[in-house]
Image (spheres, helix red, strand yellow):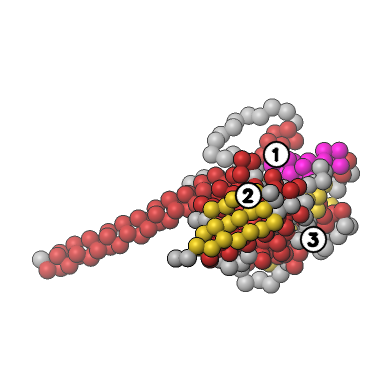
Amino acid sequence: MSITESIIDIPAEHEKNVFGGFDAYVKIIERAFNVTVIARNNEVKIIGAEKDVTRAKSVFLQLIELSKRGNQITEQNVNYAISLCFEDKEAALLEIDKDLICHTINGKPIKPKTIGQKNYVDLIRKKMIVFGIGPAGTGKTYLAMAMAITAFKNNEVNKIILTRPAIEAGEKLGFLPGDLQSKVDPYLRPLYDALYQIMGPESYIKNAEKGLIEVAPLAYMRGRTLENAFIILDEAQNTTPAQMKMFLTRIGFGSKVVITGDLTQKDLPSGSKSGLEVAIKVLSKIDDIGFSYLTSLDVVRHPLVQRIVKAYDSYEEKLKQQAVKARLENKKKLSLKFKSEKIR
């Protein structure tokens, strides 16, 4: 195996952003491609096998371009750029970065960060109803919220309605003090957090007082017709089939709906069917309803979250295989028992 080297010029103002604190991103790239990286005098020298050097160089060039566009490079960007290189999809990262949805109140751009997220956002633009299904940390609710606020600011809809089932995550909280709004607010806190981050508290309060932004439990949707609104149903895995049907039949003219959920995190009573699972089976062939399935590759929280999701996926797959094996063994035992009794 021949050793080759390649040199990249890197502007001094982007060096820290691309290399990461204590050259953390450089070390990730070295481990991923089995190369040696030497940085000196605004140059990066990459040494290793030809194919590995080519891939490592591609990752550096992508990160430099992201930095030039004003992005703060994160470990997620680095890991995703590496994974795309192994799949020969290097151009995808820079293409994804062009899709600016909006800015937060602090001026931070909100963009999809993975191919899955990009497809999800494009589907929301094209379809009237979209189901965003995937594990925690894939940006399902946050991106939907950004799309809702953008549509509201562009006068594409007259109001935003955010809802989720008020159900405890495996705990019985008992009596909560305060009026009705105070009792349901803890269940809706993640939606408020996203609203405050994107719109700012003052803008949210002003529009909420006018009735233009509504955050409410799913139970409040019964009997209503929701027209000219951008509606987000969060944590849809915790709906019952009846609740999901009730919600979907509220939708009026001029509305757009995004339904998000994680089928691996149901908080319904044991043995209960999820309204999200039933909806996927019932509605999968209807035009103008889109389904976006995000995976652990689309997790954009701390890299450890991605590894946690993968570990749980592997564990659950192993349990399924063990259950199938146990059923086959029981079937075999019953068959042998039946044959022996027949012989007698």
Task: Judge from the rendering whether residue 58 lies leftward or rightward of residue 230; answer left or right.
Answer: left
The residue to which callout 1 is attached is 189
Q: Which amino acid is tagged 3?
A: Ser
Q: Can residue 50 be seen in this view?
A: yes
C-alpha span from label 3 to label 2: 53 Å
C-alpha span from label 1 to label 2: 45 Å
| Quarter that holds the N terminus | bottom left
- How far across and how far down the image is residue 12, in percent? 74, 48
Of circles 3 and 1, the one toward us is 1
Q: Residue 39 carries which label?
A: 2
- How far across and how far down the image is residue 192, in percent? 74, 41
- How far across and how far down the image is residue 74, in percent? 66, 48
Q: Which amino acid is tagged 1?
A: Arg
Number of residues whose C-alpha sits closer than 10 Å to that of mark 1, classed few (under 14), some (14–19) or many (20 or more): few
> Is 86 colored magenta in this rendering?
no
**Callout 3 touching callout 1 (CB < 8 Å):** no
- How far across and how far down the image is residue 40, in percent? 65, 48
> Is 199 colored magenta in this rendering?
yes
Q: Is residue 55 visible?
A: no
In the image, what residue occupies the spot 77% across and 42% down? 197
Q: What stretch is highlighted in magenta?
A: 189-205
| Quarter that holds the C terminus | bottom left
In the image, what residue occupies the spot 77% across and 51% down? 70
Question: Which image quadrant is residue 169 in?
Answer: top right
The residue to which callout 3 is attached is 255
Q: Main secondary structure of the magenta part?
A: helix
